[in-house]
Image (cartoon, helix red, strand yellow):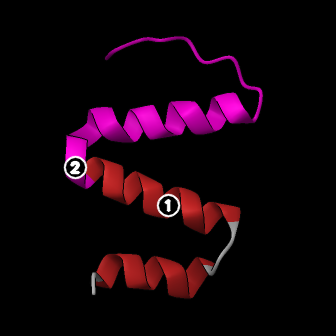
């Protein structure tokens, strides 16, 4: 079991914030910062926030 993901689940439980944190961690591990940005961008778009597609 992954210690970091386990701690996130313990602290946040099955909340939206916990799910987002888990997705960000997994995406970062798989695809680096670009993957985390993609997850965050998708999450913000789901909330109705207009996110410009800017690579930095």
Q: Give above or below for 49 relative to 53.
A: below
Q: Which is in the foreground here, disc 2 or disc 1? A: 2
Q: Is residue 2 magenta?
A: no
Is residue 37 found left or right of 56 in the rendered image? right
N-term-proximal mark, 2 vs 1? 1
Mark 2: which secondary structure? helix
Residues at circles 2 and 1 in contact by the CB criterion of under 8 Å: no
On the image, the x and y values in percent for residue 7 come to: 43, 84
- What secondary structure characterizes most of the magenta part? helix
Write down the quadrant of residue 6 in the picture. Answer: bottom left
Q: Report which residue position mark 2 lands on.
A: 30
The residue pinned by badge 1 equals 21
Q: At 42% from the left edge and 52% from the top edge, which residue is drawn?
A: 24
Residue 48 falls in which quadrant of the image?
Answer: top right
Q: Is residue 51 left or right of residue 55?
A: right
Looking at the image, is 26 positioned above or below residue 44?
Answer: below
Residue at 65%, 76% in the rendered image: 14
Which residue is at a point 47% across and 40% down the rendered structure image? 39
Q: Measuring from the top left, give residue 41's x and y in whole percent.
A: 53, 30
Q: CA distance from mark 2 to mark 1?
A: 14 Å
Residue 9 appears left or right of 4: right
Q: Estimate how packed mark 1 is, as few (under 14), some (14 to 19) or many (20 or more) residues with alpha carbons within 10 Å.
A: some
Q: Quadrant of the N terminus?
A: bottom left
Q: Quadrant of the C terminus?
A: top left
Q: Secondary structure at mark 1?
A: helix
Residue 37, position as x, y percentages in the image: 41, 34
Instruction: Judge from the rendering whether residue 32 lies leftward or rightward of residue 5; answer left or right.
Output: left
At label 2, counting other C-alpha atoms closer than 10 Å, the crowd grade (few under 14, some 14-19, many 20 or more) is few
Residue 31 image-quadrant placement:
top left
Residue 2 at what x, y percent from top left? 27, 81
What stretch of residues is rendered in magenta? 29-56
Q: Is residue 31 magenta?
A: yes
């Amino acid at each position: 079991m992954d210690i970091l993901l386990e701690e996130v689940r313990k602290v946040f439980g099955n909340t939206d914030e916990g799910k987002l944190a888990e997705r960000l961690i997994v995406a970062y591990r798989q695809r680096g910062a670009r993957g985390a940005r993609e997850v965050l961008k998708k999450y913000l778009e789901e909330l109705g926030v207009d996110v410009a597609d800017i690579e930095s």
